[in-house]
Amino acid sequence: MNQSIAVPIRNLPEKFTKSIHDHMRLYSVTMLMAENIEDVTVIPCSGTLCSYDSKAGIVTARHVWEEARKHKSLIVMTDRGPLALKTEKLVPAVPQPRSVLANTAARIPDIAFLYLDPKQKSEIEGLGKVFYSIAKRANSPHLDVQTAAGYWTIIGNPKALLNVEERAVPSFIYGTEVAHFCQEDDWDYLLVNLNIPENPGIPKNFGGVSGGGVWRTMWGVDSDQTCFRVSNLIDDCLLVEMSFYQTGGDGSQLIAHGPNSIYNRLPAFLQEPAHNNWLEKDARYTRISQPGRYA
């Protein structure tokens, strides 16, 4: 299974892709900003449960936290029920934006780590979720995104699919492709293609997917393409990006922080003594409108 071959995403067996998606959902969280768990006026967002050494928390977009902190609760949705995290109890590690990304209105970096205390971590694990260990994957060769090989997927909670009346908060997984964009101040940025004109069934607006992970899965197939498998989920099914911004236009793309941001730059930032002191209690931020918008 060492020889590379091209297999279109649509030709991957459903059983195979489902097993990969189920693995991603262990670490991914769909979330709602709200005043309480019964609130029907909610704002969806996304994140990934991660551990950096002894630190456990949620990796999401900075602008997600900027909005969430205006509400009393950040509700984590799981198959076993919701868990309301009080935002006043969350401790954010938030890199300060230093510039605007070229040809967009996105202030960068746009990434955050929301610390969870042991009780919060235990409650989330009790609902069937797992924390993704950054240290275990930091040296994987498959973090290199210079080649397009692999099965690329984005997972998140698009507002377009939210049904508050029926209390339905679906997580959405979409097979995609990724291209390098740029690097600024040691934070890297990638483009996630949506191919909206070719896929009329998907949402045109990915609002709510901000903070959602982009995953790369390396897999093997036998010579007659009847057996598909992933050799080692820890090494071969990797969180490689975190989305935060949707570009405008019919063929719009998502902009995401890449693997250097997640595996190197953010861990280094978490070691800094005053990483979250800049975020003032009364800060308010203006949302960006079309043609570019926050995902």
Image (cartoon, grey):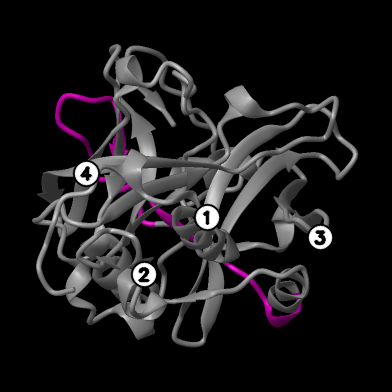
Q: Quadrant of the N terminus?
A: bottom left
Q: How far apart are marks 4 and 3 (CA)?
A: 33 Å
Q: Mark 3 points at which residue?
A: 80
**Spot occupied by residue 273 in the image (x, y as percentages of width and height):** 40, 77
Mark 1 and mark 2 lie on one chain; the one further toward the N terminus is 1
Residue at (28%, 79%) from the top-left corner?
A: 138
In this view, the residue in front, 159 or 168, is: 168
Residue 57 or residue 219, whichever sits in front: 219
For the residues labelled 1 and 2, say whether their Cβ atoms are less than 8 Å apart.
Answer: no
What SS does tag 1 mark?
Answer: helix
- Mark 2 crowd level (few <14, some 14–19, many ≥20, 10 Å Cα): some
Question: Does residue 211 appear in the picture of this structure?
Answer: no
Q: How crowded is mark 1: few (under 14 residues within 10 Å), some or many (20 or more)?
A: few
Label 4's element? strand
> Badge 3 local density, few (<14 within 10 Å), some, or many (20+)?
few
Tag 2 residue: 229
